[in-house]
Amino acid sequence: MIDRSDVLAARERIRGRVRTTPVLELDRDLFGGHACFKLEQLQHTGTFKARGALNRILRAQADGELDPAVGIVVASGGNAGVANAYAAARLGVPATVFVPETAPAFKVARLEELGASVVLEGSEYAAAQDAAQRAAARTGALLCHAYDQPDIAAGAGTLALELLEQVPDGLDTVLVAVGGGGLMAGVAAALEGRARVVGVEPETAPTLSRALEEGRPVDVAVSGIAADSLGARRLGDIAFDVATRTGVRSVLVSDDDLVEARAMLWSRWRIVVEHGAAAAWAALASGRYRPAADERVGIVLCGANTDPSDLA
């Protein structure tokens, strides 16, 4: 599916078009060891997804697979749509984004600001994805999947290459949020043989956990406070392949854990993230993931597209 070489190629392809996001070292008294945040919520469009979107569209352009008059089509609960709309606008091609009717209004507004055509479809991501696939087949537009395409996942993994370079002493473990698993797949591919990856997901959308239990991706019921960003019904095939190959494990967190972790990020560090992006930190803050005394841990904060009005 994908490996480290794909992530390295993606880095070269998108070089100069994405931000190198900073790392924040945490006080050692928090865990008695080394821990840091990778502040990927500062990426263009407020999430890591700009990396994969640019990689997908740039490669399609280079390979002659993109009709510039028709452009791209994508389904998204919000973040992937915004990222692909941003990438399409930067590269001068049109974008059509199918979103569930439950998508937050501020994300829909952002899509429209970027010039995308927005189509509301169904109550879950799966319905929007079906509609996007039909539109791509009908129009010839380039289909950009929210997470389950090699170029999308490999592009996401470029943040892990940065992270390794930004932490001179290296890392033992990197915690990442999991919905459909594109970010986890890219990070695990980039870090294979260098650091372990732990996927953190809501109890109300356990795509990775269930896939590992069943030995294959399976549909799960999706609900909860992070459903707008971690609301995929099924783990992607690429994510499952990389997770099983590299030994990714799953940690589940509750909605209360997500709320508390997000609030703590604001109160302690003045970091604003969406609930899904707080998942990696929630695993540590709640004690659901307990690092060893000398374990060096990286925590990916992957998205900031949220309404901050409930942060005191």
Image (cartoon, helix red, strand yellow):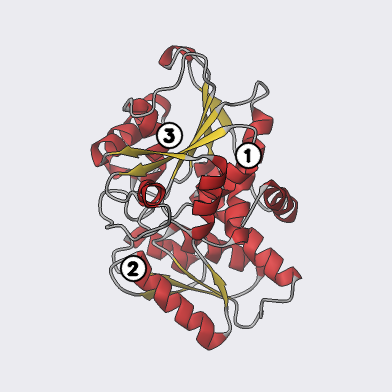
Q: Is residue 265 visible?
A: no
Amino acid on which the number 2 mark rests in the picture: Pro
**What is the quadrant of the C terminus in the image?**
top left
The residue that mark 1 highlights is: 192
Q: Please determine whether, in this image, residue 21 is positioned above or below residue 138.
A: above
Image x and y of residue 131, in percent: 41, 78
Furthest toward the bottom, the residue is 138
- The earlier-in-sequence mark between 2 and 3 is 2
* Snapshot quadrant of residue 87: bottom right
Please name which of the two marks, 1 or 3, marks the residue nearer to the observer.
1
Q: Residue 241 or 190: which is nearer the viewer? A: 241
Q: Residue at x 50, y 72 (%)?
A: 116
Mark number displayed over residue 171: none
Camera-nearest residue between 301 and 93: 301
Q: Which residue is mark 3?
A: 271
How packed mark 1 is, by other alpha carbons closer than 10 Å (few <14, some 14-19, many 20 or more), is some
Q: Are marks 2 and 1 in contact (CB under 8 Å)?
A: no
Tag 3's secondary structure? loop
Nearest to viewer (mark 2 / mark 1)? 1
Q: Is any atom of residue 190 visible in this view?
A: yes
Identify whether 96 is placed above or below 285.
Answer: below
Point out the tag, 2 or 1, that comes first from the N-terminus: 2
Disc 3 crowd rating (10 Å Cα; few below 14, some 14-19, many 20+) is some
Q: Residue at x 38, y 24 (%)?
A: 268
Picture quarter with the N terminus = bottom right
Residue at mark 2: 100
Q: Secondary structure at mark 2?
A: loop
